[in-house]
Image (tube, helix red, strand yellow):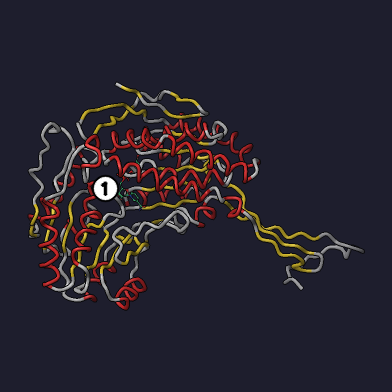
């Protein structure tokens, strides 16, 4: 049995807490490795090393820091297949989807190569007589990130690339479900030229998370995961005086107008609803067709497409649409929620409960499900299922459809399918959701825009990547400088506006 490590001060370090978590191969159900769960002391040791390394790293000029990321991007491309294979083996997602996970993170690294431009300050010449005023962006110090299982490459990269480009040290606490790729990323950063101790990986669970939240040296915490944990980390971290941004769960609606191209909408729903087994925070989990006829036609088009979905292990290559879910507990939770849907009166038009994959009976595969006539009071509508389960909520009018999305507690992503520009504009303007797709099912913004939801999908002010990342990972300092010329006028005691 492979025993994974932490990555501290440039070394793979064995865990000393005596506590471990199982890392599964979700396709076979086998435990393939044990990951150490750090104690408070192990976390604190890493923070001490980070604090020392950060002082020197911050003094490296921004362009040289950016060159490390430039070299790192080359190494990610070099090792893409190896990383993707490891990712698929621990997460279960298909090989092409694992590459996409790495690619979307790599693009944030590319964007962060432009950090010197983003970190330039502001300057006002002669703000007053003989007075110049300038603002500079300075690194925070030691920063930390806590990441979810569903994007084990992309989300750590979203966090540590800008943090490190800004001159911070970063401690990554990845998901204990799939920690191998984060360890590999830390190794590659060092191969790219990052000094030891600037990026460290401390594996763990709540104990390590709490050690991060209560550590006085750590200045900021980034979190991505489920909403209850996001709320806990945001509340606790802020109370400890840290800068915190937390991104939580989702329930993304796609509205299908009567004038939409229904084949296009059905194809989009298949990819967005069932891709990655529904384990994406930007997955569409609710389809809202407007009008009975649209609903009937849409459901009719969805059923054969869903029945044709190929579910299998990543080793089957491109011939698989989605793989297993991450753990048997996740599988049980999905099937439990499906049962509540049936019990509460939704119509299960595609039933994936008996799905079984020959040769992979112990894997965590879940068949695709489609519910029709779901109503807002049902658990399958209110809760995030995070599995291959799509719910159809029929709306009579556009107003009724948009109201559903407006009223839902989550606000991560949404989409509308229509041929009418007026409807699309109205939807984009009125909806209280952070990322909106118009005839685009999964509107994940590119690296140079920012990513973030609204409502219970986010806690904090700034989004991930794009220009917001440089604000989150720096503090602004503004200097007012006067170099008197001629005779000194003596002291000034009153706070007064610039002349
Ligand atoms: P999770 O909340 O279970 O775990 C996320 C992280 O928190 C992990 O590192 C985990 O070790 C840690 N953690 C778990 N329980 C904890 C506790 N009690 N105290 C402190 N830390 C704890 O989430 P997950 O299952 O890994 O990921 C899936 C969730 O992430 C979904 O809800 C999904 O919507 C969400 N997600 C959101 C976004 C976004 O950008 N909004 C992106 C990806 C995933």
* Left/right of residue 270 with respect to residue 99 in the rendered view: left
Residue 465: percent from the left, percent from the top?
Answer: 46, 53
Q: Secondary structure at mark 1?
A: loop
Dot 1 crowding, Cα within 10 Å, few <14, some 14–19, many 20+:
many
Q: Is residue 446 visible?
A: yes
459 and 420: which is toward the camera: 420
Q: Quadrant of residue 182?
A: top left
385 and 51: which is toward the camera: 385
Residue 101: percent from the left, percent from the top?
Answer: 36, 45
* Left/right of residue 40 with respect to residue 422 in the rendered view: right
Residue 71: percent from the left, percent from the top?
Answer: 53, 38
Q: Residue at x 87, y 63 (%)?
A: 490
Q: Which residue is mark 1?
A: 279
Q: Is residue 232 above or below residue 356?
A: below
* Quadrant of picture, ligand 1: top left
Q: Residue extending furthest top?
A: 1
* Left/right of residue 332 with respect to residue 88 in the rendered view: left
On-image quarter of the C terminus: bottom right
Q: Residue extending furthest bottom?
A: 422
On-image quarter of the N terminus: top left
Numbered disc total: 1
Q: Is residue 217 visible?
A: no
* Left/right of residue 465 with respect to residue 383 in the rendered view: right
Residue 287: percent from the left, percent from the top?
Answer: 20, 63
Q: Residue at x 48, y 46 (%)?
A: 109
268 and 131: which is toward the camera: 268
Q: Quadrant of residue 446?
A: bottom left
Q: Is residue 109 above or below residue 408?
A: above
Q: Residue at x 58, y 55 (%)?
A: 118
Q: Is mark 1 within 8 Å of ligand 1?
A: yes
């Amino acid at each position: 049995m492979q025993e994974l490590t932490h990555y501290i001060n440039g070394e793979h370090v064995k865990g000393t807490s005596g506590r471990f978590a199982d890392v599964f191969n979700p396709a076979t159900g086998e435990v393939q490795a044990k990951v150490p769960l750090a104690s408070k002391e192990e976390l604190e040791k890493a923070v001490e090393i980070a604090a020392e390394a950060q002082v020197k790293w911050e003094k490296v000029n921004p362009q040289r820091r950016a060159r490390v990321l430039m070299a790192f991007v080359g190494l990610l491309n070099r090792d893409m297949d190896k990383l993707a294979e490891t990712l698929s083996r621990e997460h279960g997602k298909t090989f092409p989807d694992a590459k996409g996970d790495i690619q979307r993170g790599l693009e944030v690294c590319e964007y962060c190569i432009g950090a010197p431009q983003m970190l330039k300050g502001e300057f006002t010449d002669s703000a007053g007589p003989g007075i110049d005023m300038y603002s500079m962006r300075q690194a925070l110090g030691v920063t930390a990130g806590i990441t979810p299982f569903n994007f084990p490459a992309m989300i750590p990269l979203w966090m540590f690339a800008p943090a490190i480009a800004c001159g911070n040290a970063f401690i990554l606490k990845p998901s204990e479900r799939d920690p191998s790729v984060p360890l590999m990323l830390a190794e590659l950063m060092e191969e790219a030229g990052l000094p030891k101790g600037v990026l460290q990986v401390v594996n763990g669970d709540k104990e390590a998370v709490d050690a991060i939240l209560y550590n006085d040296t750590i200045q900021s915490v980034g979190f991505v995961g489920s909403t209850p944990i996001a709320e806990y980390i945001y509340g606790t971290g802020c109370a400890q005086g840290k800068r915190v941004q937390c991104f939580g769960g989702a329930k993304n609606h796609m509205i299908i107008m009567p004038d939409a191209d229904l084949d296009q909408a059905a194809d989009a729903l298949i990819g967005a609803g069932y891709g990655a087994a529904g384990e994406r925070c930007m997955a569409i989990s609710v389809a809202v067709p407007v009008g009975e006829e649209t609903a009937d036609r849409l459901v009719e088009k969805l059923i054969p497409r869903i029945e044709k979905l190929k579910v299998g292990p990543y080793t089957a290559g491109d011939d698989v649409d989605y793989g297993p879910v991450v753990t048997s507990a996740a599988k049980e939770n999905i099937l439990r929620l499906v049962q509540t849907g049936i019990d509460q009166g939704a119509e299960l038009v595609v039933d994936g409960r008996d799905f079984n994959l020959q040769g992979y009976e112990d894997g965590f595969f879940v068949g695709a499900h489609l519910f029709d006539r779901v109503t807002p009071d049902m658990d399958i509508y209110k809760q995030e299922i995070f599995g291959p389960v799509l719910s159809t909520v029929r709306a009579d009018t556009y107003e009724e459809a948009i109201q559903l999305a407006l009223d839902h507690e989550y606000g991560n992503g949404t989409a509308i399918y229509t041929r009418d520009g007026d409807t699309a504009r109205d939807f984009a303007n009125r909806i209280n959701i952070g990322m909106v797709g118009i005839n685009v099912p999964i509107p994940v913004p590119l690296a140079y825009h920012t990513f973030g939801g609204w409502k219970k999908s986010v806690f904090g002010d700034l989004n991930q990547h794009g220009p917001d990342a440089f604000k989150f990972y720096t503090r602004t300092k503004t200097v007012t400088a006067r170099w008197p010329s001629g005779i000194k006028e003596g002291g000034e005691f009153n706070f007064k506006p610039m002349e």
